[in-house]
Image (spheres, rainbow, N blue to C red):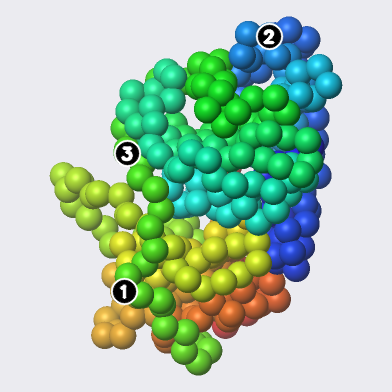
Protein backbone atom coordinates (compact mmCIF):
# COMPACT_ATOMS: atom_id res chain seq x y z
CA UNK A 1 0.00 0.00 0.00
CA UNK A 2 1.32 3.43 -0.86
CA UNK A 3 1.14 5.82 2.07
CA UNK A 4 2.70 8.96 0.63
CA UNK A 5 1.40 10.10 -2.74
CA UNK A 6 4.01 11.18 -5.25
CA UNK A 7 3.68 14.25 -7.46
CA UNK A 8 4.20 13.86 -11.19
CA UNK A 9 7.72 14.15 -12.52
CA UNK A 10 6.58 17.05 -14.64
CA UNK A 11 4.30 18.43 -11.90
CA UNK A 12 1.12 17.38 -13.68
CA UNK A 13 -1.16 19.43 -11.47
CA UNK A 14 -4.46 18.00 -12.62
CA UNK A 15 -3.48 14.65 -11.12
CA UNK A 16 -1.49 15.97 -8.18
CA UNK A 17 -4.17 18.28 -6.87
CA UNK A 18 -6.80 15.57 -6.66
CA UNK A 19 -4.39 13.33 -4.79
CA UNK A 20 -4.00 10.75 -7.54
CA UNK A 21 -0.73 8.81 -7.69
CA UNK A 22 0.86 9.69 -11.01
CA UNK A 23 4.37 8.25 -10.90
CA UNK A 24 4.72 4.48 -11.30
CA UNK A 25 6.90 2.45 -8.95
CA UNK A 26 9.87 0.67 -10.54
CA UNK A 27 11.23 -2.28 -8.51
CA UNK A 28 14.81 -2.21 -7.19
CA UNK A 29 16.36 -5.66 -6.90
CA UNK A 30 17.78 -6.41 -3.42
CA UNK A 31 18.90 -9.86 -2.28
CA UNK A 32 16.69 -11.60 0.27
CA UNK A 33 18.02 -11.05 3.78
CA UNK A 34 20.50 -8.40 2.63
CA UNK A 35 20.41 -4.74 3.66
CA UNK A 36 19.47 -2.14 1.07
CA UNK A 37 22.09 0.53 0.37
CA UNK A 38 20.78 3.69 -1.19
CA UNK A 39 23.54 4.51 -3.66
CA UNK A 40 23.11 8.29 -4.01
CA UNK A 41 23.13 8.99 -0.26
CA UNK A 42 25.01 6.08 1.30
CA UNK A 43 22.08 5.40 3.66
CA UNK A 44 21.78 1.69 4.53
CA UNK A 45 18.48 0.17 5.62
CA UNK A 46 18.39 -3.20 7.41
CA UNK A 47 16.84 -6.34 5.91
CA UNK A 48 14.45 -6.49 8.88
CA UNK A 49 13.23 -4.11 11.57
CA UNK A 50 11.78 -4.26 15.08
CA UNK A 51 13.21 -7.66 15.93
CA UNK A 52 12.26 -9.56 12.81
CA UNK A 53 9.70 -7.85 10.60
CA UNK A 54 11.08 -8.61 7.11
CA UNK A 55 11.63 -6.18 4.30
CA UNK A 56 9.38 -6.66 1.32
CA UNK A 57 9.48 -4.56 -1.82
CA UNK A 58 12.00 -1.85 -2.62
CA UNK A 59 11.07 0.50 -5.44
CA UNK A 60 11.71 3.96 -6.89
CA UNK A 61 9.55 6.57 -8.55
CA UNK A 62 12.25 7.56 -11.03
CA UNK A 63 15.35 5.97 -12.56
CA UNK A 64 18.03 7.59 -10.37
CA UNK A 65 16.96 6.52 -6.86
CA UNK A 66 16.07 10.11 -6.02
CA UNK A 67 12.67 9.01 -4.65
CA UNK A 68 12.69 5.54 -3.09
CA UNK A 69 10.26 3.44 -1.05
CA UNK A 70 11.26 0.51 1.25
CA UNK A 71 8.41 -1.63 2.61
CA UNK A 72 8.22 -3.92 5.68
CA UNK A 73 5.29 -6.14 6.67
CA UNK A 74 4.63 -8.57 9.48
CA UNK A 75 2.55 -11.74 8.84
CA UNK A 76 -1.04 -10.81 8.12
CA UNK A 77 -0.02 -7.19 7.70
CA UNK A 78 -0.63 -6.58 11.40
CA UNK A 79 2.24 -4.10 11.28
CA UNK A 80 3.20 -2.18 8.15
CA UNK A 81 6.23 0.11 7.97
CA UNK A 82 7.33 2.13 4.98
CA UNK A 83 10.56 4.12 4.71
CA UNK A 84 10.83 6.83 2.06
CA UNK A 85 14.08 8.40 0.90
CA UNK A 86 13.84 11.45 -1.33
CA UNK A 87 16.14 14.25 -2.33
CA UNK A 88 16.03 17.59 -0.54
CA UNK A 89 15.44 20.07 -3.35
CA UNK A 90 13.49 22.67 -1.38
CA UNK A 91 11.92 23.44 1.98
CA UNK A 92 13.02 21.82 5.23
CA UNK A 93 11.96 19.12 7.72
CA UNK A 94 9.17 21.19 9.37
CA UNK A 95 7.66 22.06 5.98
CA UNK A 96 7.60 18.54 4.59
CA UNK A 97 6.52 17.03 7.90
CA UNK A 98 3.59 19.43 7.84
CA UNK A 99 2.76 18.14 4.36
CA UNK A 100 2.94 14.55 5.64
CA UNK A 101 0.56 15.42 8.47
CA UNK A 102 -1.86 17.08 6.07
CA UNK A 103 -1.81 13.95 3.89
CA UNK A 104 -2.39 11.64 6.87
CA UNK A 105 -5.21 13.73 8.28
CA UNK A 106 -6.99 14.30 4.97
CA UNK A 107 -8.19 10.70 4.93
CA UNK A 108 -6.70 7.43 3.72
CA UNK A 109 -7.22 3.67 3.59
CA UNK A 110 -6.10 3.24 7.20
CA UNK A 111 -9.32 4.72 8.54
CA UNK A 112 -10.07 7.77 10.67
CA UNK A 113 -7.00 9.36 12.30
CA UNK A 114 -7.10 11.13 15.66
CA UNK A 115 -3.93 12.78 16.92
CA UNK A 116 -2.76 10.93 20.05
CA UNK A 117 0.82 12.19 20.49
CA UNK A 118 1.29 15.73 19.09
CA UNK A 119 4.16 16.63 16.75
CA UNK A 120 7.48 16.98 18.54
CA UNK A 121 11.15 17.17 17.69
CA UNK A 122 13.28 14.11 18.42
CA UNK A 123 16.77 12.77 17.83
CA UNK A 124 16.56 9.74 15.53
CA UNK A 125 18.81 6.83 16.50
CA UNK A 126 22.25 7.34 15.00
CA UNK A 127 21.82 11.09 14.44
CA UNK A 128 23.42 13.81 16.54
CA UNK A 129 20.61 16.27 17.28
CA UNK A 130 16.83 16.71 17.35
CA UNK A 131 16.52 17.20 13.61
CA UNK A 132 13.46 14.96 13.23
CA UNK A 133 9.74 15.49 13.80
CA UNK A 134 7.20 12.80 14.65
CA UNK A 135 3.52 12.42 15.54
CA UNK A 136 1.35 9.42 16.41
CA UNK A 137 -2.33 8.87 15.73
CA UNK A 138 -5.03 6.60 17.02
CA UNK A 139 -6.76 4.87 14.10
CA UNK A 140 -10.25 3.46 13.72
CA UNK A 141 -12.57 2.20 11.01
CA UNK A 142 -10.19 0.11 8.90
CA UNK A 143 -8.77 -2.47 11.30
CA UNK A 144 -5.78 -0.40 12.43
CA UNK A 145 -5.37 0.86 15.99
CA UNK A 146 -2.51 3.32 15.51
CA UNK A 147 -0.42 5.07 12.89
CA UNK A 148 2.76 7.13 13.15
CA UNK A 149 4.67 9.50 10.90
CA UNK A 150 8.22 10.85 11.20
CA UNK A 151 10.65 12.81 9.05
CA UNK A 152 14.34 13.62 9.37
CA UNK A 153 17.18 14.70 7.09
CA UNK A 154 20.81 13.96 6.40
CA UNK A 155 22.85 15.93 3.91
CA UNK A 156 20.68 16.56 0.85
CA UNK A 157 18.24 13.76 1.69
CA UNK A 158 14.96 13.46 3.55
CA UNK A 159 14.00 10.19 5.25
CA UNK A 160 10.33 9.70 6.11
CA UNK A 161 8.82 6.79 8.04
CA UNK A 162 5.17 5.71 8.16
CA UNK A 163 4.17 2.95 10.56
CA UNK A 164 0.72 1.49 11.18
CA UNK A 165 -0.42 -1.33 13.45
CA UNK A 166 -3.54 -3.41 14.03
CA UNK A 167 -2.51 -4.29 17.60
CA UNK A 168 -0.26 -1.61 19.13
CA UNK A 169 -1.40 1.45 21.06
CA UNK A 170 -0.10 4.86 19.97
CA UNK A 171 2.43 4.80 22.83
CA UNK A 172 3.66 1.36 21.82
CA UNK A 173 3.87 2.41 18.18
CA UNK A 174 6.04 5.38 19.10
CA UNK A 175 8.50 2.98 20.72
CA UNK A 176 8.37 0.84 17.57
CA UNK A 177 9.14 3.95 15.51
CA UNK A 178 12.38 4.38 17.49
CA UNK A 179 13.31 0.77 16.67
CA UNK A 180 12.78 1.47 12.99
CA UNK A 181 15.17 4.41 13.01
CA UNK A 182 17.71 2.20 14.79
CA UNK A 183 17.67 -0.03 11.68
CA UNK A 184 19.00 2.81 9.53
CA UNK A 185 22.73 3.49 9.11
CA UNK A 186 23.55 7.10 8.32
CA UNK A 187 26.46 8.33 6.20
CA UNK A 188 29.03 10.75 7.61
CA UNK A 189 27.75 14.29 7.22
CA UNK A 190 29.72 17.17 5.76
CA UNK A 191 27.30 19.91 6.88
CA UNK A 192 25.37 20.13 10.15
CA UNK A 193 21.60 19.65 9.97
CA UNK A 194 19.54 22.16 12.00
CA UNK A 195 17.27 21.23 14.89
CA UNK A 196 13.62 20.91 13.81
CA UNK A 197 10.58 22.72 15.16
CA UNK A 198 6.93 22.18 14.34
CA UNK A 199 5.45 24.31 11.57
CA UNK A 200 3.58 27.48 12.58
CA UNK A 201 1.12 29.75 10.77
CA UNK A 202 2.32 32.92 9.06
CA UNK A 203 1.54 36.12 10.94
CA UNK A 204 -0.97 37.16 8.27
CA UNK A 205 -2.14 35.84 4.88
CA UNK A 206 -0.22 36.67 1.73
CA UNK A 207 -2.15 39.22 -0.35
CA UNK A 208 -3.60 37.79 -3.58
CA UNK A 209 -3.85 40.59 -6.14
CA UNK A 210 -4.48 40.69 -9.86
CA UNK A 211 -2.41 38.55 -12.21
CA UNK A 212 1.15 39.82 -12.56
CA UNK A 213 2.20 41.28 -15.89
CA UNK A 214 5.24 39.93 -17.79
CA UNK A 215 8.53 41.79 -17.40
CA UNK A 216 10.80 42.65 -20.36
CA UNK A 217 12.97 39.73 -21.46
CA UNK A 218 16.43 39.59 -19.87
CA UNK A 219 18.46 36.85 -21.55
CA UNK A 220 21.50 37.18 -19.27
CA UNK A 221 19.63 36.75 -16.00
CA UNK A 222 17.50 34.01 -17.56
CA UNK A 223 20.60 31.99 -18.40
CA UNK A 224 22.15 32.38 -14.94
CA UNK A 225 18.84 31.64 -13.21
CA UNK A 226 18.61 28.40 -15.18
CA UNK A 227 22.02 27.43 -13.79
CA UNK A 228 21.70 28.60 -10.19
CA UNK A 229 17.97 28.44 -9.54
CA UNK A 230 15.46 31.12 -8.68
CA UNK A 231 15.66 30.64 -4.93
CA UNK A 232 19.10 32.31 -4.94
CA UNK A 233 18.31 35.87 -3.83
CA UNK A 234 21.76 37.37 -3.18
CA UNK A 235 25.44 36.52 -3.08
CA UNK A 236 26.56 36.58 0.59
CA UNK A 237 30.18 36.91 1.61
CA UNK A 238 31.79 33.48 1.99
CA UNK A 239 32.64 34.24 5.61
CA UNK A 240 29.03 35.03 6.43
CA UNK A 241 27.03 32.35 8.25
CA UNK A 242 23.54 32.42 6.75
CA UNK A 243 20.81 31.03 8.99
CA UNK A 244 18.34 28.74 7.23
CA UNK A 245 14.93 30.19 6.47
CA UNK A 246 12.18 29.55 8.99
CA UNK A 247 9.14 28.62 6.94
CA UNK A 248 5.57 29.40 7.96
CA UNK A 249 2.23 28.07 6.71
CA UNK A 250 0.06 30.45 4.68
CA UNK A 251 -3.72 29.89 5.02
CA UNK A 252 -4.31 29.70 1.25
CA UNK A 253 -6.14 26.41 0.57
CA UNK A 254 -5.25 24.03 -2.27
CA UNK A 255 -6.36 20.41 -2.55
CA UNK A 256 -3.31 18.18 -2.20
CA UNK A 257 -0.88 21.06 -1.63
CA UNK A 258 0.05 23.88 0.72
CA UNK A 259 1.54 27.37 0.51
CA UNK A 260 4.60 28.17 2.65
CA UNK A 261 6.66 31.33 3.03
CA UNK A 262 10.28 31.75 4.18
CA UNK A 263 10.60 34.01 7.22
CA UNK A 264 7.05 35.38 6.79
CA UNK A 265 8.09 36.77 3.41
CA UNK A 266 5.62 38.86 1.44
CA UNK A 267 7.66 38.63 -1.78
CA UNK A 268 8.13 34.88 -2.13
CA UNK A 269 6.40 31.58 -1.43
CA UNK A 270 6.54 27.85 -2.14
CA UNK A 271 3.58 25.77 -3.29
CA UNK A 272 4.45 22.34 -1.84
CA UNK A 273 2.73 19.36 -3.49
CA UNK A 274 1.65 16.31 -1.55
CA UNK A 275 4.45 15.24 0.80
CA UNK A 276 7.50 14.24 -1.21
CA UNK A 277 9.64 17.30 -1.88
CA UNK A 278 8.27 18.76 -5.11
CA UNK A 279 6.77 22.18 -5.59
CA UNK A 280 6.64 25.59 -7.26
CA UNK A 281 8.79 28.50 -6.09
CA UNK A 282 7.49 32.01 -6.72
CA UNK A 283 9.65 34.98 -5.76
CA UNK A 284 12.14 37.67 -6.64
CA UNK A 285 14.66 36.97 -9.36
CA UNK A 286 17.74 37.91 -7.36
CA UNK A 287 20.03 37.22 -10.29
CA UNK A 288 18.28 39.86 -12.39
CA UNK A 289 18.72 42.35 -9.56
CA UNK A 290 22.47 41.73 -9.53
CA UNK A 291 22.90 42.00 -13.28
CA UNK A 292 20.48 44.76 -14.16
CA UNK A 293 20.61 48.46 -13.39
CA UNK A 294 16.83 48.60 -13.24
CA UNK A 295 15.49 49.84 -9.91
CA UNK A 296 12.43 47.59 -9.94
CA UNK A 297 12.86 43.86 -9.18
CA UNK A 298 11.40 41.13 -11.33
CA UNK A 299 9.73 37.97 -10.13
CA UNK A 300 9.89 34.41 -11.38
CA UNK A 301 7.96 31.15 -11.19
CA UNK A 302 9.94 27.90 -11.11
CA UNK A 303 8.67 24.33 -10.79
CA UNK A 304 11.02 22.07 -8.81
CA UNK A 305 11.37 18.32 -9.21
CA UNK A 306 13.86 15.76 -7.94
CA UNK A 307 16.29 16.15 -10.83
CA UNK A 308 15.33 19.32 -12.69
CA UNK A 309 13.74 22.76 -12.53
CA UNK A 310 11.55 24.50 -15.08
CA UNK A 311 11.33 28.30 -15.26
CA UNK A 312 8.66 30.53 -16.72
CA UNK A 313 8.32 34.14 -17.86
CA UNK A 314 9.60 36.88 -15.52
CA UNK A 315 6.99 39.24 -14.06
CA UNK A 316 6.86 42.84 -12.89
CA UNK A 317 5.16 41.91 -9.59
CA UNK A 318 4.70 38.77 -7.50
CA UNK A 319 2.35 36.33 -9.31
CA UNK A 320 -0.60 35.18 -7.23
CA UNK A 321 -1.05 31.52 -6.32
CA UNK A 322 -3.71 30.79 -8.95
CA UNK A 323 -1.48 32.30 -11.66
CA UNK A 324 1.52 30.27 -10.53
CA UNK A 325 -0.52 27.05 -10.60
CA UNK A 326 -1.79 27.85 -14.09
CA UNK A 327 1.73 28.56 -15.34
CA UNK A 328 3.13 25.30 -13.98
CA UNK A 329 0.36 23.33 -15.64
CA UNK A 330 -0.22 25.17 -18.89
CA UNK A 331 2.39 27.90 -19.27
CA UNK A 332 5.26 27.92 -21.74
CA UNK A 333 8.60 27.09 -20.11
CA UNK A 334 11.41 29.55 -20.76
CA UNK A 335 14.05 27.13 -19.52
CA UNK A 336 14.55 23.64 -18.10
CA UNK A 337 17.66 22.85 -16.08
CA UNK A 338 18.78 19.46 -14.75
CA UNK A 339 20.10 19.50 -11.17
CA UNK A 340 21.38 15.96 -10.73
CA UNK A 341 24.33 14.06 -12.17
CA UNK A 342 27.72 15.00 -13.55
CA UNK A 343 26.42 16.13 -16.92
CA UNK A 344 23.79 18.80 -16.29
CA UNK A 345 21.69 19.98 -19.20
CA UNK A 346 20.14 23.42 -19.74
CA UNK A 347 17.49 24.04 -22.36
CA UNK A 348 16.32 27.59 -23.06
CA UNK A 349 13.31 28.32 -25.21
CA UNK A 350 14.06 30.19 -28.41
CA UNK A 351 10.99 32.33 -27.74
CA UNK A 352 12.57 33.53 -24.49
CA UNK A 353 15.60 35.05 -26.19
CA UNK A 354 13.94 36.77 -29.12
The answer to which quarter of the image holds residue 313 is: bottom right
Q: CA distance from mark 2 to mark 1?
A: 57 Å
| Marking on residue 289 | 1
Q: Looking at the image, which is closer to me, 328 or 235?
A: 328
Q: Is residue 57 above or below residue 33?
A: below
52 horizontally vs 149: left or right: right
7 horizontally vs 339: left or right: right
The reply to whether residue 14 is in sight is yes
Q: Nearer the viewer, mark 3 or mark 1?
A: 3
Q: Residue 119's x, y, as percent? A: 45, 43
Q: Looking at the image, which is closer to me, 92 or 296?
A: 92
Residue at the left extreme, as displayed: 239
User: Mark 2 — residue?
Assistant: 52
Q: Is residue 291 above or below residue 27?
A: below
Q: CA distance from mark 3 to mark 1?
A: 30 Å
Residue at the right extreme, as displayed: 76
Residue at left 77%, top 11%? 31
User: Mark 3 — residue?
Assistant: 194
Bin the neighbour count of mark 1 within 10 Å (Cα to Cα): few under 14, some 14-19, many 20 and up.
some
> Do callouts 3 and 2 mark residues in contact (Cβ within 8 Å)?
no
Bin the neighbour count of mark 3 within 10 Å (Cα to Cα): few under 14, some 14-19, many 20 and up.
some
215 horizontally vs 335: left or right: left
Amino acid sequence: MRYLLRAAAALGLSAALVGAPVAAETPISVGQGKPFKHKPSGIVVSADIAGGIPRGAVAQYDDKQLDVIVDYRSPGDTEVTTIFLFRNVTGDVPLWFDRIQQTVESGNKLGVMKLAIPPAAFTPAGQSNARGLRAVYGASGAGFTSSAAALTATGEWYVAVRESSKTLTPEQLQARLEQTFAAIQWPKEKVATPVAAAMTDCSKPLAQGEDAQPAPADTGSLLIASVLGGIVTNAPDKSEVVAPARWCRDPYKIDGAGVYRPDNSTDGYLIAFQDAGRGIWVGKNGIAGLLSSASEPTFMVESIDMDHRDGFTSFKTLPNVAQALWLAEKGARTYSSSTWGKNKNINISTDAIK
